[in-house]
């Protein structure tokens, strides 16, 4: 993990005074939002009902984890062969907020109890924007 070195008062020298609409993201200063993107394929024999159960559990997470700023989930539309089957995109105000989400007990429960039994492959990335 990259370290952010801050000046006294928690601000890095040269960082802008405020961040928000109309203010450019300054990567490396911890002032950007973080987007988490995770893609899945499912094991052979997994039913639509199992996928919908997993989807519903994922969609319920923003009501339980307030650090989630925005959350989207969708299944592949089937245009290109070889694509992943489903994607989840979550936006967070900071890396710290993402980590709260990542480690949250309800998120971990959804992964372990509902996701792992049906997921064949997973790929993820987190990036600042």
Image (spheres, rainbow, N blue to C red):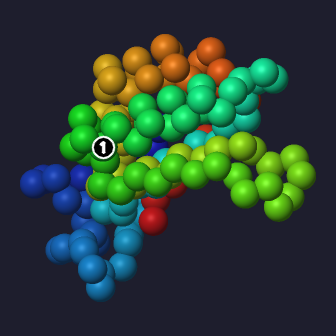
Q: Nearer the viewer, residue 68 or 28?
A: 68
- Foreground residue among 37 and 52: 52
Q: Quadrant of residue 121?
A: top right
Q: Position of residue 21 (x, y in %)?
A: 27, 80
How far from the left and from the top, in percent, is residue 96?
Answer: 30, 41
Regarding mark 1 in the picture, which secondary structure is present there? helix
Image side of residue 64 versus residue 59, left or right? left
Across and down, in percent, residue 17 comes to 17, 74
> Residue 91, position in %: x, y?
39, 54
For this orientation, the residue located farthest to the left is 9
Numbered-mark total = 1
The C terminus sits in image quarter: bottom left
Q: Residue at 36% x, 63% y: name it.
A: 32
Q: Residue at x 38, y 27 (%)?
A: 107
Viewer can see residue 37: no
Residue 61 vs 32, above or below: the answer is: above
């Amino acid at each position: 993990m990259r370290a952010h070195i801050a000046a006294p008062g928690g601000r890095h020298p040269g960082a802008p005074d405020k961040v928000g609409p109309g203010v450019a993201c300054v990567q490396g200063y911890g002032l950007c939002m973080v987007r988490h993107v995770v893609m899945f394929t499912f094991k052979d024999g997994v039913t639509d009902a199992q996928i919908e159960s997993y989807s519903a559990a994922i969609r319920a997470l923003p009501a339980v984890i307030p650090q989630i700023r925005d959350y989207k989930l969708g299944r592949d539309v089937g245009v290109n062969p070889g694509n992943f089957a489903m994607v989840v995109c979550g936006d967070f105000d900071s890396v710290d907020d993402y980590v709260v989400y990542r480690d949250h007990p309800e998120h971990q429960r959804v992964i372990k109890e509902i996701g792992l039994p049906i997921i064949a492959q997973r790929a993820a990335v987190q990036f600042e924007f």
